[in-house]
Image: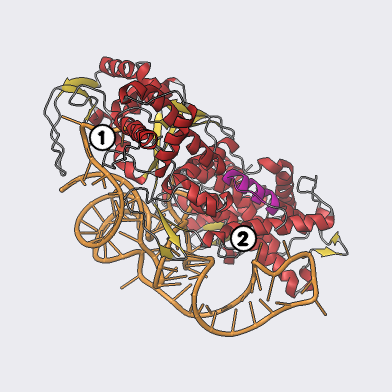
RNA sequence: GCGCCCUUAGCUCAGUUGGAUAGAGCAUCGGUUUUCUAAACCGAGGGUCGUAGGUUCGAAUCCUUCAGGGCGCGCCA
């Protein structure tokens, strides 16, 4: 249910039926919206239809507005007052009957209020942090973004697979395992570990080494080559365990983990390449040397090339390296072929800012693999800048000097991390202050929203009522004051927030909305402190059923919103 | 050199995909608690929406120019 759509349909239907009467030669409702007018006008709804039709028919929108106004008054009983305003807006005030009808509908829908019915099959790939070490703070933003996007799409009835691509293949894994091996030698045979640029220096490598020594007591670790397979398996397992445990603490669980090694072993790359060859999207050839940065290893040799320029990329891309091995990109193409074959209508990849340059080529690949049937949408999360007490602290690239997700989780609770990481559009940088997010005050939006719900819960306790209790309003006990009317308009907005957030993949709209709603509630609640007439409860009983219904509506929406965000809602604080 | 993102109040940012007098929070200043949770509320000041053009009834929003900041550029992963 969506009040804006409902009235938009009513209005456009009525107008198309009366096209002749209105002397409209042209009729198109593209761009027509019903929305909430600015607060100071004090109307429930506003419609721009006269501006659109006026332009289309080259007539004065205000004159048209007056005609349409009469038409609406005569035919639609839902409106108490209709006013033509500004350049030709129709401002509409709902009658008590229609307000009640809409309120009761929400009270009926309860948990489903705001849902935008949809039935697609989505695959969201996110996090996909390299299994060569623990997750760091930067990964958290994308992780939460992806998870909430999944919640949002599921709320609307879609099927969503949350997927993690494990890059457990290639040179960096070799170096990672080698580092573990050398640490084992260090512990077992006292051979000093000498850090170098290729090796992983972090302390967690020592932990892995210790763990392996512990579980493989008979192993001598004489030769790296001989121990490689077992070391690789153990080390990766350990890393992934760490990553999964951090994710779990953040409230995130993936449905599917896809291994790059499996993909290589199953010859998916060869399959993908031969498919693309058949369609003439891959051929042998030469590439131009890269522009800008100099690449000392670059060689002009014949190799397989994906013609990604056919699908909007800036340049064609190599699928093979100098030595004839597949590139990282080639493996990723194969991975995406697999996703396409699993019959998703929509693929979403959540990437960090440092992977922006990769988007065009992989989008091109999905286009080629699916004959443009499947759309890959890459969403980029910009950097997270860390602060402590308002002061930035830098993470240098030097050994071990980075903040891990674990460090973050040790200091800050899951709820604050999730809310704050989403309290910004994904394509702007985000300042994250370790101290501020733990404040228990209005400065901290998480607490502010949670607190509003705690207050509602407190009220329900006093009244011995529950959010899920059945409730419906009737005309005879309906009395809406100004504050409640404003709150109700905000409540009506909820389905639209869900719709935009999910269609544009912009979950940040939810925390902003919830904050606004909580503000309205706190303001209204506080009125009772100054003016006893505004108190909700007298002698442990609710004074006015309409007021109670409004508060229930707030509770329903805040609960739903926080559930989508994956943030808990204590009933007492 | 090229691509993507950003530029809105002193600071940090929203802005419903072209609408009405551009909105929040922080900071500043001034108020409110024998009370359903003051972990809260109320009020005040603060703007050339980076620049210059264009599109139209109408632009923070769309197009172009330029400037500033961030991320990236491979036959790395």
Residue at image coords 59%, 65%: A442
The image quadrant that residue A349 belongs to is: top left
Relative to A379, residue A412 above or below: below
Q: Residue A541 colored magenta?
A: no
Residue A567 in percent (x, y) is at 60, 48
Q: Secondary structure at mark 2?
A: helix
**Where in the figure is residue A430, as x and y percent of width and height?**
43, 55
Q: On residue A448, which mark appears?
A: 2
Quick one: quadrant of the C terminus of chain A?
bottom right
Give the foreground label among 2 and 1: 2
Q: Residues within 10 Å of mark 1 (few under 14, many from 20)?
A: some
Where does the magenta region start and end?
Answer: A554-569
- Could you tell me which quadrant the N terminus of chain A lies in? top right
Q: Furthest residue to the front?
A: A189
Q: Secondary structure at mark 1?
A: loop
Q: Is residue A91 visible?
A: no
Reading the image, the residue beneath label 1 is A313
Model colouring: secondary structure
């Amino acid at each position: 249910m969506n009040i804006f759509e409902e009235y938009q349909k009513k209005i456009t239907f009525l107008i198309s039926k009366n096209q002749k009467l209105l002397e409209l030669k042209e009729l198109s409702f593209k761009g027509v919206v019903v929305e909430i007018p600015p607060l100071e006008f004090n109307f429930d709804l506003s419609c721009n239809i006269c501006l659109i039709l006026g332009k289309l028919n080259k007539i004065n929108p205000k004159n048209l507005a007056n005609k349409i106004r009469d038409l609406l008054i005569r035919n639609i009983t839902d409106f108490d007052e209709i006013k033509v305003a500004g350049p030709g807006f129709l401002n509409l005030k709902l009658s008590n009957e229609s307000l009640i009808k809409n309120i009761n509908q929400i009270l009926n829908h309860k948990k489903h209020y705001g849902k935008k019915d949809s039935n697609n099959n989505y695959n969201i790939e996110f996090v996909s942090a390299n299994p060569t070490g623990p997750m760091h703070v930067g990964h958290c933003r994308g992780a939460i973004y992806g998870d909430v996007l999944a919640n949002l799409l599921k709320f609307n009835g879609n099927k969503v697979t949350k997927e993690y691509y494990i890059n457990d293949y290639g040179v960096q894994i070799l170096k990672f395992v080698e580092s573990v091996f050398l640490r084992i030698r260090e512990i077992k045979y006292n051979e000093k570990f000498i850090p170098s640029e290729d090796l992983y220096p972090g302390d967690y490598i020592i932990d892995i080494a210790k763990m392996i020594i512990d579980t493989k007591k008979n192993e001598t670790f004489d030769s790296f080559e001989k121990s490689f397979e077992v070391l690789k398996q153990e080390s990766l397992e350990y890393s992934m365990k760490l990553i999964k445990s951090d994710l779990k603490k953040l409230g995130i669980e993936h449905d599917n983990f896809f291994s790059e090694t499996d993909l290589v072993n199953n010859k998916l790359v060869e399959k993908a390449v031969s498919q693309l060859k058949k369609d003439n999207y891959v051929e042998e050839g030469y590439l131009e040397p890269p522009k800008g940065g100099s690449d000392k290893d670059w060689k002009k040799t014949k190799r397989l090339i994906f013609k990604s320029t056919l699908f909007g990329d800036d340049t064609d891309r190599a699928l093979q390296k100098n030595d004839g091995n597949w590139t990282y990109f080639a493996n990723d193409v194969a991975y995406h072929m697999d996703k396409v074959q699993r019959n998703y209508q929509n693929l979403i990849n959540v990437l960090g800012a440092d992977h922006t340059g990769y988007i065009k080529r992989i989008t091109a690949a999905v286009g080629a693999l699916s004959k443009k049937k499947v759309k890959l949408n890459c969403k980029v999360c910009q950097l997270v800048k860390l602060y402590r007490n308002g002061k930035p602290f830098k993470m240098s690239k030097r050994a071990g000097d980075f903040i891990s997700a674990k460090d973050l989780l040790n200091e800050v609770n899951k709820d604050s991390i999730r809310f704050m990481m989403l309290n910004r559009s994904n394509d702007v940088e985000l300042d994250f202050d370790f101290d501020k997010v733990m404040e228990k005050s209005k400065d901290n939006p998480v607490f502010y929203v949670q607190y509003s719900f705690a207050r509602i819960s407190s009220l329900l306790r006093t009244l011995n009522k529950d959010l899920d209790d059945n409730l419906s309003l009737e005309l005879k006990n309906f009395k809406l004051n100004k504050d409640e009317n404003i709150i109700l308009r905000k409540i009506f907005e909820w389905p639209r927030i869900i719709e935009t957030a999910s269609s544009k993949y912009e979950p940040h709209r939810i925390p902003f909305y919830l904050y606004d709603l909580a503000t309205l509630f706190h303001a209204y609640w506080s009125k009772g402190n100054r003016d006893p007439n505004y108190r909700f409860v007298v002698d442990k009983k609710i004074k006015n059923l309409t007021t109670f219904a409004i508060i229930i509506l707030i509770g329903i929406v805040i609960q739903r919103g926080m559930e989508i965000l994956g943030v808990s809602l204590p009933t007492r604080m």
